[in-house]
Image (cartoon, rainbow, N blue to C red):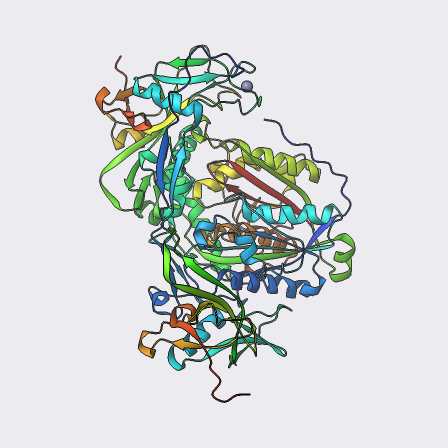
Amino acid sequence: MAGKEAKLPGTYLKGDEMYKLPGLVEHRPEAKYSFAAGQAVSRFLEGLKEGRILGKRCPRCGRVYVPPRSYCEYCFAPTGEWVEVSGEGEVNTAVVSYISTFRERLEEPEIVGVIRLYAPGYTGKEDEYEFPGLFHKLCGVTPEDVMSGRVIGMKVRPRWKPVERRIGSITDIECFEPAEG
Amino acid sequence: MVVARPNIHVKNRVAIVGAGLTLFRRRMLETPRELAWEAARMALEQAGLTLRDIDCVVIGSAPDAFDGVHMKGEYLADGAGGLGRPTVRVYVGGGTGVFVPIAAWWHVASGLCRSVLAVAEEKMSPAHPHPQGVFAYIWDPILERPLGPNLIWIFALEMRRYMYKCNVDKKTIAKVSVKNKRNALDHPAAQAAANITVEDVLKSEVLVWPVQRLDISPVSDGAGALVMVSENEARRVTDSPVWVEGVGWTLDNTHWYNRDLAYPRYVNYAARMAYKMAGIERPWKEIDVAEPYDPFDYKELHHIEGLMLARRCEAPKLLEEGWFERDGELPTSPSGGLLGVGNPIAAAGIMKVAEIFWQLRYEAGARQVKKPVHKGVAQAWGDLMQAGTVIVLGN
Amino acid sequence: MAWSMWWREPRRTYRFPGKMEVEKYVYTPGLHGLEAARALKEEGKFLGTRCGDTIYYPPTTLCPDYTEGELAEVKGPWRITAYTVVRETLEGERLEKPLVIAHIAPDDAVGGLIHYVDASPDEVYIGMEVEPVLKPKEERRGNPVLDITHFKPRRPETEE
Ligand SMILES: [Zn+2]
């Protein structure tokens, strides 16, 4: 039954065979949504507009959350004070994307990564398994830097959009770029 | 986080007595409920039972947005044999396929049901222009989606971190793809079986470096099913039941970029829960055959480490030594995995459990591993590097 | 708010728009569904799935006992088993002519279709005999809901 010779049910449709079937039904979902950012992230977004990166500290375990959460996931308690981080950090991982969201080929590859942010007096939990950080684009680095691994551990800082173009979005930071010196 | 301490005082031991699969293909004529029915019917037939012998039904299917049918559990109920029975649908993203037999296990172990039909189905082909569009909706709408991500980004980021942390190159990782696609040549459901070389993988289209075309499993339609029963029932219907010895599952948070992606903590916690229940203390010695989840080639190595079948960063070295081949010390993905057999999400996970079932019954034909087998483990992963589901089987 | 907050709360809660990034879904008719689609498109016939003495319509492929059924023609007559009258559009505008929507089942099968009935709300009743009005063959695509324009009352030619 389980061997290679087993005949399994299922009718494969090749190429555009499917589109020629009688009885085929098509439907367009047209579903639109409006997502609320919530208290903590809304304040975070306002901070971005002001050119600041804000997080929250849990008074019980000391975890620093960037982006901020209203509650500590581990202590299950409200997080307390807001903290501001400088925005400087290290590249934790980075990749080179040659495709768009819908898998179209990009003319210019895009480099994105995870940035582990420096927070005063906090290095992370569980042997640095958890840390404050952001997912963002990287600029001023080349695909070769990513492939060689040079970019990992690199010190970076945010490149802000000009103040008049900030709207309270993660894209108010244009990208993270190498910090000189 | 803490590892759950499972209460091992269960009312009934649970056995798997039958398994069924449909073909895995890019697009199929059958409706989702017909696919579920074909797989379930085959599992019943193999168990020598009929639908009348079934007390309860557990259904698993990943996002509704692939099939384009809401309330997929209810929709699939008749095809999955659930009409007029206590029926439930479970869902933990890509982890669903292994979560279905886990949920079926607690139905039987609790004494609530004597026999359960566990059915997993996925039809990804309805979503147009490409199922990729559905995946866009797993990203956070506020902090991630404005960056215009493609699903592959997150895997590439994880793979890159793993490569860095463990100092492993793409050439080594590609060997997983080569192994699994070759193993799949012997699998009757396989969609992407092939004899390829490491060179082929490295020459395939670069999507999001380090991820290339042949590092990824294909999009598929398909279904799989298991019949799971209490010990008394099992003794009645078969001489070769396969016992569920341990189950484990864990969910981490959605803030994947606040965690070190080099190691799958959520898989490790689930594994430790399952091993504890199974009384396994040294999984790297006690497990004979494994089906770690492999939607991407590096993921198999990543999960082998999470499952403690190798030390951290040791899996690539063992792979190079042939450790994970069918005739190796610890064969992994002898089925051909998702890379070779295909990836109809929930169905792919249950295919892995079915493979361990067949291996432990010595029924896997050309896929049968060389060494004698007593215990096997199957695992799936899901969501934003979050969900780990693990099941340990023994004969 | 109970916990200390030396920084102010946000002035507003930000909202972000989103759209389901699926252009469309394409649903295949399935095994018996495909045969039924062909029969409807080519011959204007209705096929269901026969399990023992019972025919299920629309075709289900599988039977309640989990075996595969056989294709069988459903001939009717069709009868209204439940109906509702729609007098307003979704936007709340009064319809000039109320719409009668009914569940219509063939006498010789279990199941049925939801469809429009071309009848006035005063004359429609449960048990009323109706018949499907099909689009011309060249416009039919094999789906009963799309290929039937509506059901019309079957007026008795002779008094019973
Ligand atoms: Zn805390």
Kindly identify the residue that appears in the image at 58 percent across and 41 percent down: B389
The answer to whether residue B112 is seen in the rendering is: yes
Image quadrant in which the N terminus of chain B is located? top right
**Front residue (pair A77, A86):** A77
Left-right relation of B246 to B123: right
**Front residue (pair B146, C43):** C43
Kindly identify the residue that appears in the image at 50 percent across and 15 percent down: A80
**Front residue (pair A179, B294):** A179
**Front residue (pair C81, B109):** C81
Figure check: B277 above or below C159:
above
Figure check: C57 above or below B83:
below
| Quadrant in which residue A36 is drawn | top left
Locate residue A26, reporting x and y percent. 37, 61
Left-right relation of C86 to B231: left
For this orientation, the residue located farthest to the bottom is: C158
Locate residue B10, reporting x and y percent. 76, 42
Ligand 1 falls in quadrant: top right
Locate residue B32, reporting x and y percent. 50, 60
| Quadrant in which residue A44 is drawn | top left
